[in-house]
Image: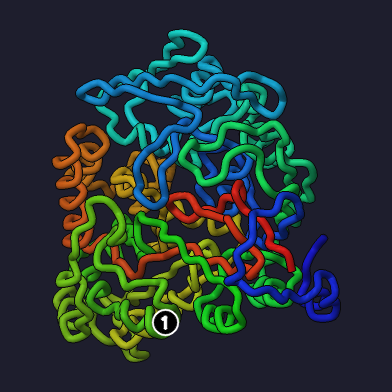
Amino acid sequence: MTLSRRSLIAAPALLPALAFDAQAQVAPVRGGTLIYLEQQTYSNLYPPAGGHYPAGGVLNQITDKLTWQNPQTLAIEPWIAESWTINADATEYVFKLRPGVTFSDGAKLDAEAVAKNYDTYGRGNRELRHSVSEVITNYDRSEVIDPLTIRFLFKAPSPGFLQGTSVIGSGLVSPATLALPFDQMGDATKIIGSGPFVVTRQVLGRELVLNARPDYAWGPKTHPHQGRALLDTVRMIVNGEDSVRVGAVLSGQAHVARQIPAFDEARIQGRGFQVFAPPTRGVNNSITFRPDNPLVADIRVRRALLHGTNAQEVVETLLSPNYPRATSVIAATAQGHVNLSDRLAYDPVLAARLLEEAGWTHGPNGVRTKEGQELALAAYESPNYARSRDTMQLIAQQWGRLGVKLSVLAGDLGSRAVDSLDPAKTPIAPAMVGRADPDVIRSNYYPTTRNMLLQTGGVSRKVQSFSDPTLNAQLDAIASEPDQAKRLALVAEVQRTLIDQAYVIPLFEEPQVFAGSPRLRGMDFEAVGRPSFYGAWLAPR
């Protein structure tokens, strides 16, 4: 089924309007079909590439992980691994696996299968174009000790590895799936996991149907639900129109929808429906500079734009209380956060002075110029992020008052992907990433991972010379420091570096926001806001 604005308005009988007392206490109901609306489609389901929320929302239903990060406490708890030991310098991890677990194709999920997964995620596979996972650092190799025991060895300390075994990018898949080349992993029917649901039908870009796996019996032991999933079926339907997704939930044609606009939250709750806003606990929604571009190479220009950005206006104008104003590069709920609000003050007078000191003076059309060149910047909106276009356009207005021109580009997926690797075309870019571990800050800024600053040494061949060895050494230290107190101190140091060098302008903490039917019960979210339908059920009308 494809949902359009017309079909949802003209055919309200698709699902009857819901009338249910949300306060009624009823026992969980087994069976039924849940309709879930997603804003975007997935492009690839190779787990280390699954950080994109539409892909993660699929992988979270069909794959399991070695460990489970409790979303309330953030503690790492057993899942497919029953127990583990870690040596003193975090260079050796040994996991004991749960017996009797199988992938949906019948293959055993044993130590051999786990070794195949992590050797791929930790080292990549050039022939099949499988990339190295950004959550695994310093990986050397695995050793199968016995069918249910596996050892991982690292070339240097890897203190983030344990938490990395709990994330979406570490979903365990069948050896048959790992034998596929990367470009075939956009086909969900070929992704074989051991999770509570299996893919039964796919209409690429439009719909995915998941059915409960009847023999599933190995969910996280502390999860409130045990056994097979309560639902029979989950239908994931893609529709990019916010108003259509909201309307479908309110009219009873869908049970839950992701990426709900902030301005709709009060209306949804006022109608007796549910709003969920789980935090992402990682790098905040931010503007990131690419200093390889000469227009933003001068720290005075970057500092001017930092102090010329009114993040409070962005939050108050475009968002809801579920989006707190950022006080640092990472969220206040993230490990290692330090409050740097005093370094992020909105001060347009200071901003103007810094631009003048950098030699940028007002030109005849109001845009600042220097040696005949306008201070004109461009950035792509990011459909992945909340109110991205509106946010960037509001910031363009703020910068315009300083005499700085910012063009906000839409573009297609291809142009955004290519231009985002070219600092000449994208001197700034929006960015955020969710992960409940200090390694998240390294993942976003280190050259060989997401490389949001576009330094040399990353995948971009367009970077001429920009590199910050001091920052990179700090990021490397985060990934290799086994002492947790020292590691968090390094995270604080990196936050100060990113702000003091004006590489980043933090804006707001971005949750994942969902609208839900009053009938929807038991749906929960992993530690960074991806939905899990394992324990979800639909109460009677």
Q: Is residue 242 above or below residue 363?
A: above
Indicate the position of residue 472 as horizontal and vertical percent values. Answer: 23, 42
Residue 196 sits in quarter? top right
**In this rendering, position of residue 394 left or right of residue 359:** right
Residue 459 sits in quarter? top left
Viewer can see residue 132: no
In-front residue for pair 244/275: 275
Determine whether the residue tagged by mark 1 lies in a helix, strand or loop.
helix
- Give the quadrant of the C terminus: bottom right
Residue depicted at 62% across the width and 47% down the height: 58
Q: Residues within 10 Å of mark 1 (few under 14, many from 20)?
A: some
Indicate the position of residue 502 as horizontal and vertical percent values. Answer: 22, 63
Q: Is residue 493 above or below residue 272?
A: above
Residue depicted at 48% across the width and 50% down the height: 526
Indicate the position of residue 501 as horizontal and vertical percent values. Answer: 19, 60
**What number of labels is visible?**
1
- Give the quadrant of the N terminus: bottom right
Viewer can see residue 350: yes
Residue depicted at 38% across the width and 33% down the height: 136
Dot 1 amino acid type = Leu
Q: How is the image coloured?
A: rainbow
Give the labeled residue for mark 1: 394
Q: Residue furthest top?
A: 146
**In this rendering, position of residue 519 left or right of residue 315:** right
Indicate the position of residue 164 as horizontal and vertical percent values. Answer: 40, 36
**In this rendering, position of residue 161 left or right of residue 126:** left
Residue depicted at 57% across the width and 23% down the height: 127
In-front residue for pair 50/457: 50
In-front residue for pair 260/213: 213
